[in-house]
Image (cartoon, helix red, strand yellow):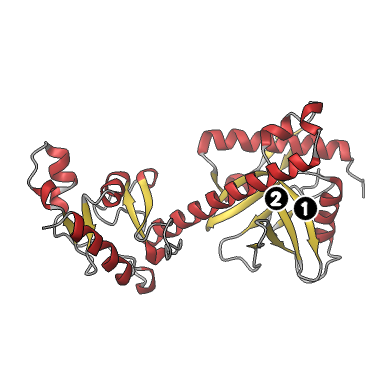
C-alpha cells in the first residue's frame, strides 16, 4: 500500500477546513450528513468528511480527519470535570487502528474536525479540535477546541510564545463551545418533540423557532431536558420570557390582563390576544410534555406580578 505523506495530509486537512468553513457560511453551523459524507474534491479525488464510524480517516490522509458523536450512538461521549470532551475509543482495544490514529494525532498535534450529532442526519461543526489526552484504562481520549483564527496565524511567532497561553485559550474556547453544543442539542430535541411547530401558534418554519426554557437555565432546576422546554416562535418566546402571557399547568395559555385591554393593531390582536385561553400543541410522547410542576412555579410568578 502506498503511504500517504504527512505533507499531503496537511494540504488535504487545510482544504477540508476551508471547505467546511465555507459551508458553514452558506448553511449555518448545522450541516446535513449527506453533505458531509459527499465531501469535496481535492486534486480530482473525492474527500468525504465522515463515515459510518465515529473516527474517520479519508484515503488521502495519514491520520484521522474527523471524530463524530452520533445522536443516540453506541458510544458514551461525555465531558470530564476539567471541561474536556471525553471521546470514546473505537471498541475496547486500545491498539485498534482508529485509536492508534487518534493517538498519533495527539502526539503530532494535528488538528481535527468534531461533528456533534444534534438529531439523525444533522451535525454541528466544530473546528479545529485537538486530542490532548489518552486514557486506555477508561477507553477514551481527551479533546479540546481551539480558535481557528489563532491556528491560521500560527506562522506568526508572537502566537507561538507561550504554551501556557495556548492552554488557557483552549480551555476557554472549549468551555464556550460546550455551552453552544448543549444549547443547540436542547433546541433540536425540543423542536423535534413538537414536530417542528410553535406550541402556541403552530408556525412551522424552523428558522423562526426557539427552544424556550420553562425554568430558566440560569436557575437551579433549569436542566436542558425536553420537559423543561417549549418549542416557540421568536414572537411567543419573547412574550413568554417577558410574561406577556403564561402557560398554565393544564396546558392552557393565559394572556395578562393589561395586554388584553390594550389596542395596538393586528399584530397584538392576532399574535398575542387571540392566544388567550387556547390549548397548546403537545409532544406525542407523555414524558416529553411540559413538566406540570415547573409550569406551576412559573405560572405562580406570572399570577403574582402580571395577572388579576
Q: Is residue 42 above or below residue 285?
A: above
Q: Is residue 134 above or below residue 236?
A: below
Query: What element does badge 1 sit on?
Result: strand
Quadrant of the rendered structure where residue 74 is? bottom right
Labelled disc at residue 132: 1
First along the sequence among labels 2 and 1: 1
> In x, y percent, where is residue 79?
64, 61
Q: Observer-nearest residue: 75 or 172?
A: 172
Lateral position of residue 101 relative to residue 308, left or right: right
Pointer 2 residue: 144
> In x, y percent, where is residue 10?
81, 37
Lateral position of residue 163 relative to residue 251, left or right: right
Lateral position of residue 151 relative to residue 186, left or right: right
Q: Residue at x 21, y 69 (%)?
A: 250
Query: What element does badge 2 sit on?
Result: strand
Q: Residue at x 71, y 54 (%)?
A: 143
Given contact means CB atoms under 8 Å apart, are the residues at marks 2 and 1 in contact?
yes
> In x, y percent, where is residue 144?
70, 50
Q: Residue at x 88, y 40 (%)?
A: 6
Residue furthest front in the image: 304
Q: Is residue 22 above or below residue 66?
A: above
Q: Is residue 90 visible?
A: yes
> In x, y percent, where is residue 41?
70, 36
Q: Residue at x 92, y 46 (%)?
A: 2
Amino acid at each position: 500500500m502506498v503511504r500517504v505523506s504527512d505533507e499531503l495530509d496537511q494540504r488535504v486537512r487545510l482544504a477540508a477546513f476551508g471547505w467546511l468553513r465555507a459551508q458553514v457560511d452558506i448553511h449555518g453551523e448545522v450541516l446535513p450528513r449527506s453533505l458531509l459524507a459527499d465531501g469535496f474534491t481535492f486534486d480530482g479525488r473525492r474527500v468525504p468528511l465522515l463515515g459510518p464510524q465515529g473516527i474517520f480517516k479519508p484515503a488521502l490522509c495519514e491520520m484521522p480527519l474527523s471524530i463524530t458523536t452520533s445522536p443516540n450512538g453506541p458510544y458514551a461521549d461525555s465531558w470530564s470535570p476539567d471541561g474536556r470532551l471525553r471521546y470514546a475509543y473505537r471498541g475496547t482495544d486500545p491498539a485498534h487502528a482508529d485509536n492508534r490514529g487518534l493517538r498519533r494525532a495527539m502526539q503530532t498535534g494535528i488538528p481535527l474536525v468534531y461533528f456533534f450529532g444534534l438529531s439523525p442526519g444533522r451535525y454541528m461543526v466544530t473546528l479545529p479540535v485537538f486530542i490532548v489526552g489518552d486514557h486506555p484504562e477508561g477507553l477514551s481520549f481527551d479533546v479540546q477546541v481551539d480558535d481557528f483564527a489563532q491556528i491560521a496565524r500560527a506562522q506568526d511567532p508572537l502566537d507561538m510564545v507561550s504554551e501556557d497561553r495556548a492552554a488557557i485559550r483552549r480551555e476557554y474556547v472549549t468551555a464556550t463551545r460546550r455551552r453552544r453544543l448543549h444549547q443547540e442539542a436542547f433546541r433540536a430535541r425540543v423542536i423535534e418533540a413538537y414536530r417542528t411547530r410553535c406550541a402556541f401558534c403552530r408556525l412551522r418554519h424552523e428558522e423562526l423557532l426557539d427552544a424556550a426554557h420553562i425554568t430558566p437555565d440560569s436557575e437551579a432546576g433549569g436542566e436542558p431536558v425536553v420537559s423543561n422546554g417549549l418549542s416557540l416562535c421568536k414572537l411567543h418566546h419573547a412574550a413568554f420570557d417577558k410574561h406577556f402571557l403564561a402557560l398554565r399547568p393544564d396546558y392552557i395559555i393565559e394572556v395578562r390582563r393589561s395586554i388584553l385591554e390594550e389596542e395596538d393593531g393586528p399584530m397584538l390582536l392576532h399574535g398575542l390576544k387571540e392566544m388567550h385561553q387556547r390549548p397548546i400543541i403537545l409532544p406525542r410522547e407523555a414524558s416529553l410534555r411540559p413538566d406540570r410542576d415547573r409550569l406551576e412555579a412559573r405560572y405562580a410568578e406570572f399570577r403574582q406580578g402580571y395577572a388579576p
